[in-house]
């Protein structure tokens, strides 16, 4: 029994370690995608201002969007310690998620280079959609198979439906983005901007209400 407990702790620790490592790499790669112009290409303050407005600002905006999305997905990995065990299904779903997460920096760069083409936004949103769906499937599986530790489940059970609804938001948002991108690529990206801005306003408002 003690050996089995140790084995499960080791499985949890290994899954947490690789998950945190992949997210750390993905978040770092996002920053590396921000391009700094060579000194030889900028010869005046006006040229630098033009670069900042037309190139740097869009890069930083998309970086912020991708960073927040990745951070929210990473927050979902806090569920790992609540698993009773790490079975093959849980492991497969988590590895599939990580395989997609490492593609988010690529899709971010792809949008920056081809933002005026629908395909770039669709690829970006498709990755977000798949990651969101996999997290939703993971939680549904955990609840259905009773794989959440009892001492934790009794606290989250009253909020289970709310958790699943919140997990449904990213894939729904991504699906809306894909549909809009078919008609207007920028509209597909504006969906994320509007929702993230609204979320920030909501959090700030809650803090003011509490105070």
Image: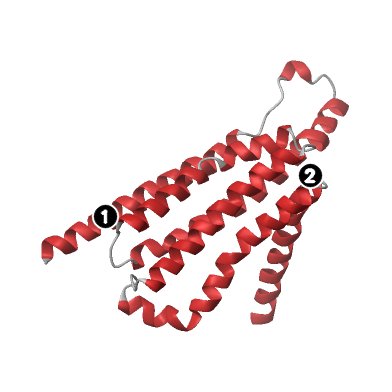
Residue drawn 44% across the image and 62% down it: 138
Residue closest to the eye, 150 or 44: 150
Question: Measured from the top left, where is residue 89 in percent x and y?
Answer: 35, 57
Relative vertical location of residue 34 with respect to residue 84 in this rendering, above or below:
above
Residue closest to the eye, 103 or 71: 103
Label whose residue precedes the other's in the sequence (2 or 1): 1
Spatial CA distance of label 2 from label 1 is 42 Å
Residue drawn 44% across the image and 44% down it: 22
**Counting other residues with Cα less than 10 Å from the Cα at mark 2, is it few (<14), some (14-19), or many (20 or more)?**
many
Quarter of image, res 121:
top right
Which residue has dot 2 on it?
Answer: 185
Relative vertical location of residue 172 with respect to residue 32 in this rendering, above or below:
below
Query: Is any part of residue 76 visible from this angle?
Result: yes
Question: Measured from the top left, where is residue 86 in percent x and y?
Answer: 30, 59
Question: Measured from the top left, where is residue 109 in percent x and y?
Answer: 65, 35
Residue projecting furthest to the top: 40
Looking at the picture, the colour scheme in use is secondary structure
Q: Which mark is residue 11?
A: 1
């Amino acid at each position: 029994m003690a050996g089995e407990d140790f084995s499960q702790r080791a499985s949890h620790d290994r899954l947490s370690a690789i998950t945190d490592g992949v997210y750390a790499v993905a978040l770092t790669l996002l920053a590396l995608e921000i391009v700094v112009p060579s000194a030889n290409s900028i010869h005046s303050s006006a040229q630098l201002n033009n670069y900042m407005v037309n190139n740097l600002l869009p890069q930083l905006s998309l970086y912020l969007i991708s960073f927040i999305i990745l951070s929210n997905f990473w927050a979902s990995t806090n569920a790992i310690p609540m698993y009773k065990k790490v079975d093959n299904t849980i492991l497969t779903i988590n590895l599939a998620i990580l395989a997609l997460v490492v593609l988010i920096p690529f899709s971010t760069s792809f949008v920056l280079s081809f933002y005026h083409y629908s395909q770039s936004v669709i690829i970006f949103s498709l990755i977000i959609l798949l990651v969101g769906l996999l997290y939703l499937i993971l939680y549904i599986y955990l609840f259905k198979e009773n794989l959440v530790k009892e001492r934790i489940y009794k606290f989250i059970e009253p909020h289970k439906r709310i958790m699943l609804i919140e997990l449904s938001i990213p894939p729904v948002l991504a699906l809306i983005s894909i549909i809009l991108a078919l008609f207007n690529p920028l509209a597909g990206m504006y969906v994320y901007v509007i929702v993230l801005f609204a979320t920030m306003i909501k959090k700030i408002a809650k803090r003011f209400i509490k105070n």
